[in-house]
Image: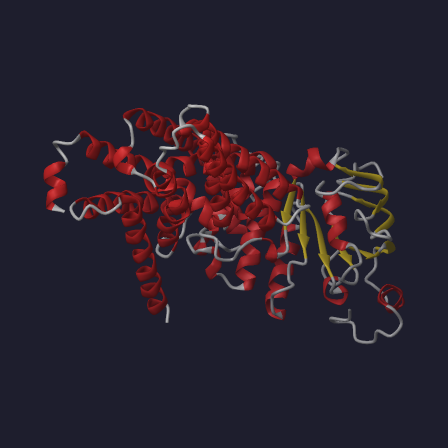
Amino acid sequence: MSDFLQALPNHTFLQNALLAGILASIGCGMMGTYVVVKRIGFLAGGIAHAVLGGMGIAYYFGRSPVGGALGAALLAALIIGWVNLRGQEHEDTLIAALWSLGMAIGILFISQTPGYNVDLMSYLFGNILMVPRADLFLMSGVDAVIVLSVLLFRKQFVAVAFDEEFAEVRGVSVTFFYLLLLCLVALTVVLLIQVVGLILVIALLTLPAAIAAQYVRSVGRMMWVAMGLGAMFTTMGLAFSYEPNLPAGPSIILLAGATYLLSTLVTAIRRR
Amino acid sequence: MTVPSVLDLEHVSFSYPGASSAILEDVSLSVQPGEFLGIVGPNGGGKTTLLKLILGLLEPSSGRVRVNGRNPALARRQIGYVPQTATFLRDFPICVQEAVLLGRLGRTRLLGGYTAHDRRIAQQAMEKTEMLTLRRQPLGNLSGGQLQRALIARALASEPEVLILDEPTANIDLRGERDIFDLLKALQAEQTIIVVSHDIAFISKYVTRVACLNRTLICHSTEAATSAVIEQLYGKSVHVIRHAH
């Protein structure tokens, strides 16, 4: 911990990592809250894993993996959302299909890439210490889109998350706002992949909001608490993992998961 | 009939895709301003389907639905809708006041939060339903009767011309049921009310007219339901009226 604090002013990569964690927690607090109250964590997991397809293709063609991730995440979100709204296919089956299809495509493309020197592990488990400066700008942009959308459409998002039928009757376009919500979740997933990698994304997306839900009773307050917890987990995870030279992503998730379990236990005892 | 109808159904039929028989057949019904109409009938008789047609959530297979003379999909913002309580998650983190404010959607600005005007209207709706003191309570903490009042307040916040309630007393005890209908009776001075129920005996004391629905509109009477009508609606074997279905 003290090593981390000493190293922080001297190392740009640590400052970048810290900033990446904070930026990720903004999107994670806001969209994670909707994911938790709307109970679409599995759907978000599907989007996260399908993203590897886009990353692999982008990598094969020598483009930025983040761009591929964005494209794949949005595409997966729209496919799942559209099929879900039509209600003709089993949603969980479709999510499972996209989940594994995306990963299969990603692995195939990465394996065929000349050189094959990509660190697959950093896609899967994240590498917050290697976040380039350009990605920080991209993350800020994604955060800006999320914050602006939530500020503008918070009434509609709550209506669609709470009671779709009533929202429809009040003239809210449930199709539009549900798909917009899923697209923002997709953006958030890409944001968080920078920090913890695609396998651990669901944990960082849902755990801070799930902990918040145990203590506060409004969507707005859940967002603030979840953002604070997200920032705390990423910062502390980074700090704790620095000296023993542990991977940062899993350390962050371990902290978040342990806090969630402890909080659930405390809540259960309190309610008895 | 010089007064324009709030609601007009002309020979409306509906069947769900793939279903072999129609759930509604040749239903014609007209509702005037200020009426308190009860739609009764056995479960599966098409009551909720009829509501969905009126709300424009479903399109009739044939016939025509008009709300204030307009297509329901366009006119449904003028409807205050109180769904059966099961349509949302009880543990959703929302308090009474926030839930009531959702009724302002379609009436308020598109972007940003609610206006001071919205909050005033929501407050009035909570006053009318005696929910003002409970406005900060999470929805999940309310009793069945309180939840129903909150949902009625949400519908009133839409400043509706017609209030439509789907089985408002399905999960409430007898006393709560009476309270809800007394409230509706008081609201009738200001708006047209349509309430769907399977409990014909109870609502006939409150409503100005009963429409009996079992696939077709069997009766359409201004008087309280007679036993002959109930027999026709529910079948001859029915002797006890309450909860006979």
Q: Is residue A215 left or right of residue B227?
A: left
Q: Is residue B145 left or right of residue A196?
A: right
User: Dividing the picture into quarters, in which one does residue B235 lie?
Assistant: bottom right
State the image coordinates of residue A54 (x, y, percent, origin top left). 48, 32
Q: Is residue A166 left or right of residue A72?
A: right
Q: State whether residue A74 appears in this view.
A: yes
Q: Quadrant of the C terminus of chain B?
A: bottom right
Q: Is residue A79 above or below residue A91?
A: above
User: Dividing the picture into quarters, in which one does residue B6 lie?
Assistant: top right
Q: Is residue A215 above or below residue B28?
A: below
**Along the line of sight, the residue nearer the viewer: B231 or A115:** A115
State the image coordinates of residue B61 (x, y, percent, origin top left). 83, 42
Visual colour scheme: secondary structure
Q: Is residue B17 above or below residue A185?
A: below
Q: Is residue B28 above or below residue A188?
A: below
User: Dividing the picture into quarters, in which one does residue B227 lie?
Assistant: bottom right
Q: State whether residue A154 appears in this view.
A: no
State the image coordinates of residue B41 (x, y, percent, origin top left). 79, 60
Q: Residue at x 35, y 30 (%)?
A: A139
Q: Is residue A2 left or right of residue B53?
A: left
Residue farthest toward the front in the current orientation of the protein: A115
Q: Residue at x 54, y 51 (%)?
A: B128
**Along the line of sight, the residue nearer the viewer: A13 or B215:** A13
Number of numbered markers: 0
State the image coordinates of residue B207 (x, y, percent, origin top left). 74, 57
Q: Quadrant of the N terminus of chain B?
A: top right
